[in-house]
Image: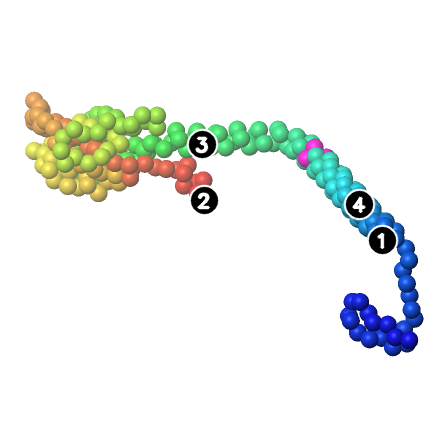
């Protein structure tokens, strides 16, 4: 007995005869049940995935909270350790402040004793220093600069009242004084002959920042 397939239109030999006597509604109902089962399984799968995501997120949140607590505990420990050295830090701050104040206070310092000794060695032996007037810079204010053109910057002015037994050669003295550290420029003042036959001379020397001793700065750099 032969049967022709309605799907492939092929001739099948020896096939078992079958007849579906059920109404189409029954087959449709079966297909609907299968579809509902598949949909139900999909919904269950989605719910399970959602629950897994929530559980994973909750676990990550708990881990983050644990890490945060550990970090906070570590911070508290470090702060407690630092508190032991507060006094040492305060002392160090006071030392640093004192060093800075000393550096600032000595930033415009000139060793005038040594400077005047250098002046004495340059001047002729028959010249005596009668009076010295010093006007120097302060670390808290700028030094007044010259208003005359071609005069360099200065940080101090040294006025010397001198006495010479011979007619002084002030320009020659100034030439020798150029070897002084920080010498910027100099001008001769008045020359007056006394009743004793000596000569009184006034010299004005302008000193620049190269004359600063910087003794504390040198010590701190070392």
Q: Quadrant of the N terminus?
A: bottom right
- Near mark 1 (Cα within 10 A), the count class, few <14, some 14-19 or many ≥20, is few
206 shown above or below 26:
above
Distance from Cα at disc 3 to Cα at disc 1 = 103 Å
Spatial separation of the CA atoms under disc 4 and disc 1: 28 Å
Q: Is residue 121 visible?
A: no
Residue at point 77% right, 70% down? Answer: 8
Q: Residues within 10 Å of mark 2 (few under 14, many from 20)?
A: few
**On screen, 162 above or below 218?**
above
Residue 43 lies in the magenta-colored region: no
Outermost residue, top direction? 195
Q: On the image, numbered disc 1 is attached to which residue? A: 24
Q: Which residue is mark 3?
A: 100
Q: Secondary structure at mark 1?
A: helix
Q: Are marks 4 and 2 in contact (CB under 8 Å)?
A: no
Q: How crowded is the residue under tag 3: few (<14 C-alpha within 10 Å), some, or many (20+)?
A: some
How many marks overall?
A: 4
- Which residue does the image show at 19% across and 41% down from the upper left? 178
Q: Which residue is mark 2?
A: 222
Q: Quadrant of the C terminus?
A: top left
Disc with the residue nearer the chain's start (4 vs 1)? 1
Identify the residue at horizontal 61%, vertical 31% (top origin): 88
Which residue is farthest bottom?
13
Marks 2 and 3, the one that precedes in the sequence: 3
Dot placed on the residue nearer the N-terminal end, 4 or 2: 4
The image quarter in which residue 164 lies: top left
Figure quadrant of residue 197: top left
Q: CA distance from mark 2 to mark 1?
A: 106 Å
Residue linked to disc 4: 43
Asked if one can make out residue 209 in the rendered structure from this viewpoint, the answer is yes
């Amino acid at each position: 007995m032969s049967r022709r397939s309605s799907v492939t239109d092929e001739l099948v030999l020896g096939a078992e005869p079958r007849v579906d006597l059920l109404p189409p509604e029954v087959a449709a109902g079966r297909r609907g049940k299968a579809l509902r089962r598949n949909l139900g399984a999909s919904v269950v799968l989605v719910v399970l995935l959602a629950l897994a995501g929530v559980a994973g997120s909750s676990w990550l949140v708990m881990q983050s909270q644990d890490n945060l607590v550990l970090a906070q505990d570590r911070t508290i420990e470090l702060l407690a350790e630092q508190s032991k050295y507060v006094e040492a830090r305060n002392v160090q701050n006071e030392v640093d402040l004192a060093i800075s104040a000393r550096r600032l206070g000595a930033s415009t310092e000139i060793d005038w004793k040594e400077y005047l000794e250098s002046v004495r060695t340059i001047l002729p032996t028959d010249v005596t220093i009668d009076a010295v007037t010093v006007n120097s810079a302060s670390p808290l204010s700028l030094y007044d600069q010259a208003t005359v053109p071609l005069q360099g910057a200065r940080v101090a002015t040294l006025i010397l009242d001198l006495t010479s037994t011979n007619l002084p050669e002030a320009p020659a003295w100034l030439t020798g004084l150029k070897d002084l550290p920080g010498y910027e420029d100099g001008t001769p003042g008045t020359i007056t002959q006394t009743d004793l036959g000596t000569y009184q001379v006034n010299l004005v020397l302008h000193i620049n920042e190269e004359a600063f001793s910087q003794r504390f700065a040198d010590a701190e750099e070392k």
